[in-house]
Each structure stands twice: as C-alpha cells, then as structure tokens.
Image (cartoon, rainbow, N blue to C red):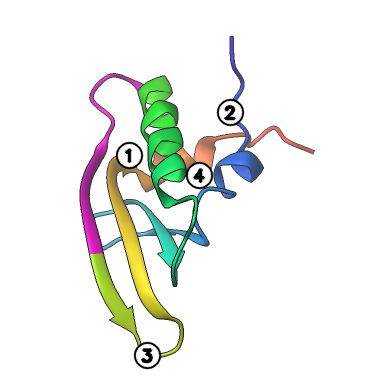
Amino acid sequence: MIKLLKSDIYRIGDTVCENDEGNCEFVFYEECKDYEAQYILLRSILLLFGEHMRIVSVEEYVDEEVGVTIALITNLPWETFVKIGEEED
C-alpha cells in the first residue's frame, strides 16, 4: 500500500491552498515546464483518495506579482488533505 505524505503532495505546484469551496487547489506560478506532468501526477494521486476525487477545473489568470498563474481546482476536501501524514514526525 502506498503511503501518502503531505510533504510529497506539497511538491505538486508552487502552492497548495484551501479554496472558497473548502477543497484543495494546486497553484503554479509563471510558466511551468512540467505543468502537464504535474497535472497527470496530481490526477493519479487523487485516484488514491477514491475514484470520485479529481481535478474539476483549471483556471489561468495573471497575478500582478508573479505573472501567469494556473490553478488546478480539485474536489478533494481540505480536511482530508490536512489529515494526510498527521503521524509524520
């Protein structure tokens, strides 16, 4: 069985945050060369939480400080993400 560690999931994207709906959002700043690979990796990781967990939308916008920003919005509840690896030292 694969053990998910929060520290590993935080490596996907530049930021992981809770969105307005209470779900996980993975954000990429500027041009990300590995964006497509990260997208596929995140999709695969979400399947480990259950077949109904997925990326529900992709938003691209311009942030005044960092330039082009891409946000992958998931239906993974933030509370579920927070519980990952709670027993980590």
Residue where numbered disc 2 is placed: 4
Q: Residue at x 41, y 27 (%)?
A: 44
Q: Which mark is residue 15?
A: none
Counting residues from the start of the chain, the first of labels 1 and 4 encountered is 1
Q: Name which residue lies at 36% across and 75% down.
A: 68
* Mark pair 1, 4: CA separation: 11 Å
Q: Which residue is mark 3?
A: 64
Q: Secondary structure at mark 1?
A: strand
Magenta segment, which residues?
50-59
Q: Which residue is mark 1?
A: 76
Q: Compared to 82, does 18 lie above or below?
A: below
Residue 58 figure quarter: bottom left
**Of the residues tagged 3 and 1, which is closer to the observer?**
3
The N terminus sits in image quarter: top right
Q: Nearer the viewer, mark 2 or mark 4?
A: 2
Separation (CA) of disc 1 from disc 2: 14 Å
Q: Residue at x 45, y 89 (%)?
A: 65
Q: CA distance from mark 3 to mark 1?
A: 28 Å
Tag 2: Cα neighbours inside 10 Å, few (<14), some, or many (≥20)?
Answer: some
Contact, mark 2 vs mark 4 (Cβ under 8 Å):
no
Most foreground residue, 66 or 89: 66
- Label 3 amino acid? Glu
In the rendered image, which quarter is residue 30 located in?
A: bottom left
On residue 82, the disc is 4
Q: Tell me if label 3 and label 1 are in contact, CB under 8 Å.
A: no
Q: What secondary structure is marked by label 4?
A: helix
**Which residue of the protein is positioned furthest toward the top in this rendering?**
1
